[in-house]
Amino acid sequence: MPRANRHFLPGYVWHITHRCHQKEFLLKFARDRRRWVSWLFEAKKRFGLRVLNYIVTSNHIHLLVQDRGEGEVAKSMQLVAGRTAQQYNQRKNRKGAFWEGRYHATAVDTDGYLARCIVYIDMNMVRAGVVAHPGEWPESGYREVMDGRRRYAIVDTPALLELLGIRSAETLQSARQQWVEGSLHAGPAEREDAWSQS
């Protein structure tokens, strides 16, 4: 079967998911998750990737980006996925696929759905039963924004503020905390295909 074409449209927000080969837990160790994050930071520097949120789990990643129309999304995914796999395979003396095919990209409407998608990504490890609160998972955009990280920041806070119509980073932190608390109090979280299926 031929591969689907990917056409990223300038200004659009994309929710990207990429699973490890055969859903293996190839990112179960923090050092491997941190390696993926460091390559994401490199992609931001090299290509100007506009990252709005992310999380690296033990067997897949979620990435929320805004396309600027300069091919930065495809170049960034190639860099991050390729280098992460290459370094892992070299370190483990392993051969074969690291990722399960190509990544999946779903367009996200910025009218209300953007905040819901951000919370969906933030709650990933809570849904998996690994942590009780998103702040407990270090390789995530939630942790970065809530810690107020400035140096080596990956999340493009000004772009996120503009898209959400929020005036300050402090207000974003407060809103994000309220969204997550609301989700936690809503009951058992479930996976929603709408965020990862066309």
Image (spheres, rainbow, N blue to C red):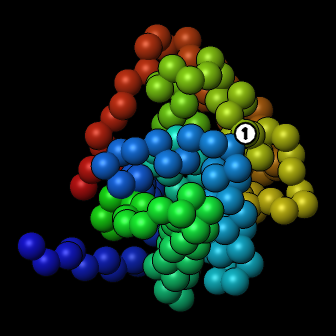
Could you say where residue 180 lies in the image, as x and y percent from the top left? 61, 27
Q: Nearer the viewer, residue 112 or 119?
A: 119
Q: What is the residue that sits farthest to the bottom in this orientation?
A: 70
Could you say where residue 20 lies in the image, as x and y percent from the top left? 41, 53
Q: Quadrant of residue 108?
A: bottom left
Q: Would you say 108 lies left or right of 178 here? A: left
Amino acid under label 1?
Pro
Q: Give the structural element (helix, strand or loop) at label 1.
A: loop
Q: Quadrant of residue 29?
A: top right
Can you see residue 42?
A: yes
Residue at the spot 68% in from the left edge and 34% down from the top edge: 137
Residue at the spot 31% in from the left edge and 64% down from the top edge: 101
Residue at the spot 53% in from the left edge and 88% down from the top edge: 70
Q: Would you say 3 lies left or right of 191 here? A: left
Could you say where residue 138 lies in the image, as x and y percent from the top left? 72, 39
The residue labelled by disc 1 is: 138
Rendered-image quadrant of the C terminus? bottom left
Is the residue 67 above or below the residue 143 in the image?
A: below
Is the residue 184 above or below the residue 141 in the image?
A: above
